[in-house]
Image: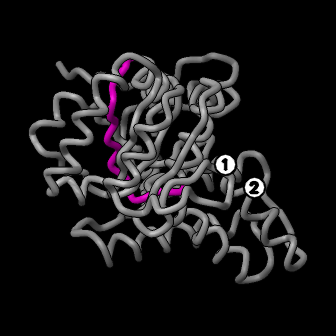
Amino acid sequence: MPPLSDLALMIQSRYPFIAVETSEEDRLETTLSQVAGDLRVPFFVWTVTNGLHRHGLPNAIYDSQQPLKGLNNVAAMTGEALFLMKDLHRYLTDPAVVRKCLDLAPAFGHDRRVIVMSAAKVELPSELEPLTARLTLALPGADELKSVVKRVVAECSRERPVSMGLSPGDLDRLVDRLRGFTEFEAERAITQAILRDNTLDARDIDFIVELKKEMLRKDSVLEYISPEENLAEVGGFKNLKAWLAKRKKAFTPEAKTFGIDPGRGILLLGV
């Protein structure tokens, strides 16, 4: 995910439009809500099905579902605000909608008002490209995934007794195996792991790996190969093995917290 500071920077840089390509709408909405809170500006969400409404409030503005009417309501709000308009790009084949966006751009360029357009793929007409900043919602990082694990355990615990048997080290290894999942996929994977035996422990790490293998087999030409080899199977390199044994603790989360740089690689030079 782009850091919150990146999104805030785009908003404060007076871009009238920001295009974010993602399939994780809920995660983007949560992130934008945090940004709006940090900037102390109102946050509104629009969809063609529900219309325009203030984030966190149930009632939409009357008769604001159609794209042009939604944009007219956005134009009527002269104060600073952040607007998430989901799938708006799909309606930019309508010249009137494009024209309205162009009409809004000069005013939005002078204050902290911005329209964020989101979809899995956002294609824009050439007139709007120079006025639009593009950001990518990256996959969740370690901290987000750790929060997902704790949240799912708490949610499942409200429905049934759940035993949390992960040590801090096991939790870090589990989070590492969850890398590459979207937040939704990580939630489903942890939920499945818990529902098997109402427990989340070190045994579920291998289960997560199997789910990742299955996902790759189903959706990709890639194949996941488990890293089963170890240094005992490598002949020679006595000094390198001794150095790795000495340095292995520098790659732990504790070392990272302490501020130790784990290093990025090793150069092996033969003579």
Q: Is residue 177 visible?
A: no
Q: Position of residue 17 (x, y in %)?
A: 32, 34
Q: Is residue 7 magenta?
A: no
Q: Point out the image quarter for the C terminus.
A: top left
Q: Is residue 63 left or right of residue 224?
A: right
Q: Compared with residue 114, is residue 94 higher up or lower down, i.e. above or below?
A: below
Q: Which residues are magenta?
A: 13-26
Q: Which three-letter amino acid code belongs to the residue tagged 2?
A: Lys
Which amino acid, by three-letter code, is at mark 1?
Lys
Q: Is residue 72 above or below residue 108?
A: below
Disc 2 crowd, CA 10 A, few/some/many (<14, 14-19, 20+): few
- Expressed as whole percent of the image width and height from the top left, the position of residue 227 reads 42, 57
Farthest residue to the left: give it: 126
* Residue at the image point whose x is 44% and y is 19% from the top: 111
Location of mark 2 (residue): 150
Asked whether 178 or 11 is in front, the reply is: 11
Q: In the rendered view, tell whether residue 157 sits above or below residue 17.
A: below
Question: On the image, numbered disc 1 is attached to which residue?
Answer: 146
Q: Residue at x 47, y 62 (%)?
A: 63
Quadrant position of residue 2: top left
- Residue 246 in the image: state x and y as whole percent: 59, 25
Q: Coloring scheme of the render?
A: one colour
Q: Which disc number belongs to residue 125?
A: none
